[in-house]
Every structure is written in C-alpha cells, then in structure tokens.
Amino acid sequence: MHRSVHRSAAFAPPAGRAGRVLQAAAVTLVGCAPNAQSVTAPDGPAAERLLELSWILFAMGGAVFALVVAVLLYALFRRHRAPLPPAAAADRRSTRWIVIGGVVFPGIVLSALFPYVLRVQRATQQPPVDAALAVEVLGYRWWWAVRYLSDDGQPAFETANEIRIPVGQPVRVRLTSADVIHSFWVPRLQGKMDMIPGRVNETWIQADAPGVYRGQCAEYCGLQHAKMAFLVVAEPPDAFAAWYARQLQPAAEPAAPLAVRGRAVFLESPCAACHTIRGTRAAGRTGPDLTHIGSRLTLAAATVPNTRGHLGGWIADPQSIKPGALMPATPLAPADLRALVLYLETLE
C-alpha cells in the first residue's frame, strides 16, 4: 500500500444485523437519490472540469443555433424592395455567405476552443503522479473484479463490484476487460473510459466528499448491461486505511457452529470451484472473490442490497434476480442454505 495511506484500526464498520440494515438503507438511498448518477452534480475535480467544458460547449452551441435561427427568420420575412440582382452577383453573394458561415466562422470558433479542450482532456484523463494508490478493474459479463495494487504493482488483494477510496486523494485506475468491450463510468467523479480485451487503459478518480457514488458500464455489452453497475465508496483516510488493513487479512475462522457448517457446505458445493475465499482451499477464478463479501454493500454488481434474503435468493436462483447472469443456480437443502448464508455474512 502507498505510504501516503496510513493503516489504522480506529475505524470499524457496523457489525451484525444492525450494520447490514444500515448498509442496505444506504444503498437504497443512493439508488433513489436524484443525483446518484448525475453529471451535473460533480464531487471530484475531474467531473467538475468535464461539467465546465460541457456548459461551455452547450452555451456555444446554443449561441450558434440562435444565430442561425435569426438569419433564417431574416431571410424569410425581409421585404425585397429592390429588384433582384443579376444571377452572377447573386451567386457571388451566396458563395461569400457560405464561406463566411461554413468555413471562416467555425474555423475561428473551433480554433479558439481546441486548446482548452486539450487541457481539459489532459487534466481529466492522465492519472496524477501523486496518486494515493492504484487499483486494477477488470470487466466481466456482468460484474467487476477490483484488485488493489501494492507499491511494486502486484495485487495486494481483490474484491468485487465495489471500489473504496480515501476522500480527497487521487486514485489511479487501470482498466481492461476479460471478454467483451465494457466502459468504466462514474458520472459524479470522472468521464467514461473504454475497457478493451488485451489492452490496458488508465484513468483516475477522486472524491472530494465522503459518500457512495454509483458507477455504470457505459458500453453495451450484452443481456445484463443495464445491471452491470458498481459503487465507489469514499471514506476519510483513517477509515479507508482500517478497511484496507482488514481486506489484507484472510477470511476469519467461523465461531458459531452453524457458520462452521456453512463453510463446509461452501467447500463441498460447486461454489468453491468458481470463487475464492482466502484462508480456505477455495481458489476458483471464474466468479468474484468472496473473502470479505459480508462487508460489501450490494450483490450482483449493485443489482440488490447485500441482505440475508437477497444473498440466499442469489445463491439459490440467480436468474430470478439477474436473468442471463452466468452464475448457475446452487440447489441446496434449506438448512444448508441457511448455514451457508450465515457463514458468508461473517466474512467481513
């Protein structure tokens, strides 16, 4: 982890059922908030620059539109008191207006705007050299793998569908795809960036205020494109450092007998072939890393809140929540399903 982020154990998230209820309420409020994915409510320096550019382009486009309408109305309603000029003179006048309106005027306007657009592009797309940390986001159909990188560029740990960052610090984001073209977009923090198989693109995000910011795949990628979302959770640096330190640890040993049974159910079921839980023999790479799934706010790429009911439903019948999802149903006896859900809830 980068030296600018200090590890601390002073912060601890709400635990148990009350904590999960608070998490679900937070996600629900974020999903219903009018500015959840609004480019007009920026909360980071990159999004602010992009909004400023958008307003300038909108104002210039509006001014040009108003000018064209004014000229059109003048041509329609003016009175022709003098006789029409000869055809040659009319042609010369038409050519002059075409050159002025179609070449000279756009050339002046676009030439004046072009350097500013380049500055905004450089400022918003090029990651700062003083980034607090780096994460690698890998797009799948239809979810996101998030790997936090150590100072030597190697993965420190992996999570899914949720990016936690320290408030007020830029974070470098490396983007690629495992299957088809996706697009990484957090409207309130940054513009869009494509995720292309076999290629790594880089962008950056920074949140100037604590909060939960919704991101979305902005490139149509198949049946569940609309439900391929993620959350960026911005926390004070001390809280983020404590979360980071917890994520470095393997899964905690279950204490309750029912949770112990749930771990056995997980390891003996097809789940262990697709998912990883660090600290156990489960090392599947097909699906998301579940080492600390209990601390995440949502399931199925921000499709539903991470509650006991949704977790059980997602395991038993994912198609009822996200039709077309590549995760197969896992038929379990009711008692085994309850034990498995309890075990996964303890992985915080």
Image: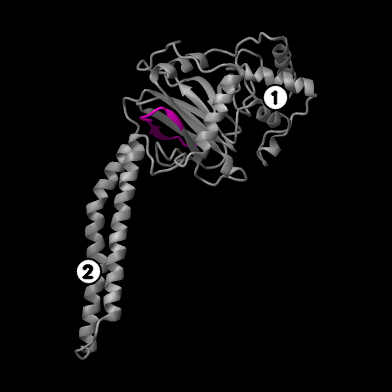
Where is residue 98? Give x, y as percent: 26, 72
Picture residue at 30% right of the left edge, 42% below the top: 120
How far apart are the alpha carbons under marks 2 and 1? 68 Å
Q: Which residue is mark 1?
A: 271
Of the pair 106 and 153, the residue shown nearer to us: 106
Q: Is residue 239 left or right of residue 252?
A: left
208 magenta-colored? yes
Quarter occupied by the N terminus: top left
Instruction: Check disc 2 and report the residue beneath it.
Output: 100
Relative depth, front residue between 19 and 286: 19
Residue for point 77% across, 20% down: 336
Q: Is residue 196 visible?
A: no
On the image, the x and y values in percent for residue 234 come to 43, 27
Crowding around mark 1 (Cα neighbors within 10 Å: few <14, some 14 to 19, many 20+) is many
Above or below, comparing residue 257 to residue 231 in the picture: above
Magenta-colored stretch includes residue 72 = no
Q: Find numbered disc 2 in the image and state the secondary structure of the residue it sits on.
A: helix
Q: Is residue 53 left or right of residue 22?
A: left
Q: Quadrant of the C terminus?
A: top right
Q: From the viewer's perspective, is 309 left or right of 136?
A: right
Check residue 149 in the rendering and tell me which mark sits there, or answer none. none
Residue type at the position of mark 2: Ile
Instruction: Determine whether the residue tagged by mark 1 lies in a helix, strand or loop.
Output: helix
Relative to 64, is 307 above or below?
above
Q: Amino acid at mark 1?
A: Cys
**Residue 104 x/y as whole percent:** 22, 64
Residue 279: x and y in percent read 61, 12
Q: Which residues are magenta?
A: 196-212
Q: Is residue 16 visible?
A: yes
